[in-house]
Image: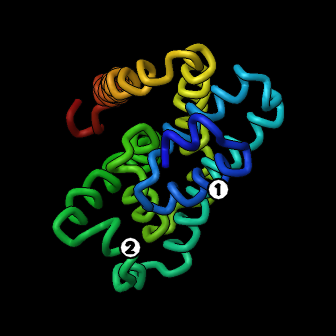
Amino acid sequence: MGDELLSHGSLVLVFVWLMIGSLGIPLPEDIALLAAGVMLSQGTATLPLTVVVVFVGVLGGDMVLFLAARRLGPRAYDKKLFQRLLPPARRARFEDLYAKHGGKVVFIARHVAGLRAATFVLAGIHQMAVRRFVFWDALGACITVPLIVGLGYLGAHHIDVVRAGIAHVQHYIVLIVVVLVAAYLVYRQVTKKPPPDAL
């Protein structure tokens, strides 16, 4: 199915794929973004329309999942979809990460397919502010979406090579993001003023 999307896809199919994939269904987001880049390269899609479609598809799907979990609150844990995305065995670890880092976890999770949906559900259950969620999610999307669409555009005639190499690119992105977040946390710790009784 992914090969069909890359070879004969349309922006409508890209949009539907992104929306469904954001809900935790195993449809890799990267395939749809690569396909959008291929369509741009082949002249079957225009840049402004492609930008709108991919960003609305990516962020729209994320928002559906987040808002559904936010509306349900802790009751979301009783629903089968959310149990599959956030099984009890992983819940404590995710909740600990979320408690410590909040929005930064949303930003990092946007780049990691296995963490993305679960983190967005958790953010919703814990009633993260909608504007805050959109900010961190959009910030993450502004890094990976243009990169993967650009890879599809540049590698339209060598799409198999691009697909094989995209996993390596994502690993580097995640590594860079983690290093930047760690550096920020260390900086905050070092520059934090000591309490008055410690002086």
Q: Position of residue 44 (x, y in %)?
A: 78, 30
Tell whether 100 sits left or right of 135.
left
Q: Which residue is mark 2?
A: 82
Q: Name the residue at 32% across, 49% down.
A: 114
The foreground one among 54 and 60 is 54
Please identify the quarter of the rendering in which residue 105 is found. Answer: top left
Q: Nearer the viewer, mark 2 or mark 1?
A: 1
Mark closer to the chain start, 2 or 1 = 1
Q: Is residue 44 visible?
A: yes
Q: Quick one: SS at disc 1?
A: helix
- Say which amino acid is labelled 1: Val
Q: Residues within 10 Å of mark 1 (few under 14, many from 20)?
A: some
Name the residue furthest left: 89
Q: Position of residue 94 (x, y in %)?
A: 28, 57
Q: Are marks 2 and 1 in contact (CB under 8 Å)?
A: no
Q: Name the residue at 71% across, 43% down.
A: 10
**If the image is split into quadrants, where does the C terminus sit?**
top left
Q: Name the residue at 33% across, 56% down.
A: 99
- Say which amino acid is labelled 2: Phe
Q: Is residue 162 above or below residue 15?
A: above
Q: Is residue 26 above or below residue 159?
A: below
Q: Is residue 124 above or below residue 170?
A: below
Whole-number angstrom distance, CA of label 2 to CA of label 1: 21 Å
Q: Residues within 10 Å of mark 2 (few under 14, many from 20)?
A: many
The foreground one among 123 and 13 is 13
Q: Which residue is mark 1?
A: 16
The foreground one among 121 and 190 is 121
Tell whether 175 sits left or right of 106.
left
